[in-house]
């Protein structure tokens, strides 16, 4: 049976927590009376642009849902490990694609950069890199064969 290496689980939990805090901060800043963002670039313009919402839902809320999903899947979700890994991989895959799309919007549609959004993007890419490396390395630390990892 597949098992997440404990160190990988701790890193995923830590980075997901930081990403959750960034997303919550962006949501709070976007909806507080005084947009008191600690941002030297165009965070307010990015968050309050036409692209800052999808179907009326702030992008920051989608970030909160994304990071909470990873935390739940990584920590407490009572699923068989293979299914859990598949869900984590799918969640991260969607997160990477959506992050690339959001960076495209910043550069080519909004023409402003939000440093907090980029912080979240870096976290998503690092999380995905960790999962890809775990699959490529075949969980050598946990004794799992590569054939079992064809998720």
Image (spheres, rainbow, N blue to C red):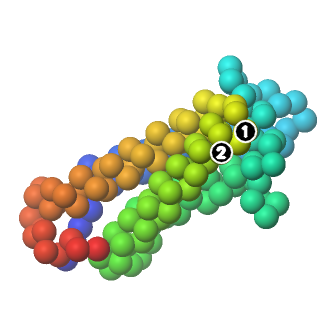
Report, in whole angstroms, how far the alpha carbon at label 1 lies from the one at label 2. Answer: 6 Å
Q: Are dots 1 and 2 in contact, CB under 8 Å?
A: yes
Side of 7 where 76 appears, left or right? right
Side of 129 where 23 appears, left or right? right
Q: Report the residue at 59% width, 45% height from top.
A: 104
- Image quadrant in which the N terminus is located: bottom left
Q: Report the residue at 65% width, 57% height from top.
A: 62
Answer with the quarter of the image where residue 103 lies: top right
Above or below, 116 relative to 140: above
Above or below, 86 relative to 129: below
Task: Please provide percent x and percent y for residue 126.
Answer: 38, 44
Task: Please provide percent x and percent y for residue 65.
Answer: 61, 60
Q: Pick whichever, 100 or 70, lies toward us.
A: 100
Q: How many marks?
A: 2
Q: Report the residue at 13% width, 69% height from top.
A: 146
Task: Please provide percent x and percent y for residue 113.
Answer: 65, 31
* Label 1, residues with CA under 10 Å away: few <14, some 14-19, many ≥20: some
- Image quadrant in which the C terminus is located: bottom left
Q: Report the residue at 15% width, 56% height from top.
A: 137
Q: Point out the tag, 1 or 2, that comes first from the N-terminus.
A: 2
User: Badge 2 is on which residue?
Assistant: 105
Q: Pick whichever, 5 or 102, lies toward us.
A: 102
Above or below, 86 relative to 135: below
User: Badge 1 is on which residue?
Assistant: 110
Q: Pick whichever, 120 or 68, lies toward us.
A: 120
């Amino acid at each position: 049976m597949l098992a997440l290496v404990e160190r990988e689980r701790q890193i995923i939990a830590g980075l997901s927590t930081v990403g959750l805090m960034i997303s919550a901060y962006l949501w709070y800043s976007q909806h507080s009376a005084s947009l008191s963002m600690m941002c030297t670039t165009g965070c307010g313009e990015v968050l309050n642009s036409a692209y800052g919402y999808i179907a009326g839902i702030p992008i920051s809320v989608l970030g909160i849902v994304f990071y909470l999903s990873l935390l739940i899947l990584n920590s407490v979700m009572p699923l068989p490990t293979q299914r859990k890994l598949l869900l984590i991989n799918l969640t991260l895959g969607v997160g990477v694609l959506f992050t690339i799309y959001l960076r495209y919007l910043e550069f080519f549609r909004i023409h402003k950069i939000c440093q907090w959004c980029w912080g979240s993007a870096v976290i998503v890419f690092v999380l995905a890199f960790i999962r890809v490396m775990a699959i490529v390395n075949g969980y050598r630390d946990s004794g799992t064969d590569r054939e079992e990892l064809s998720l």
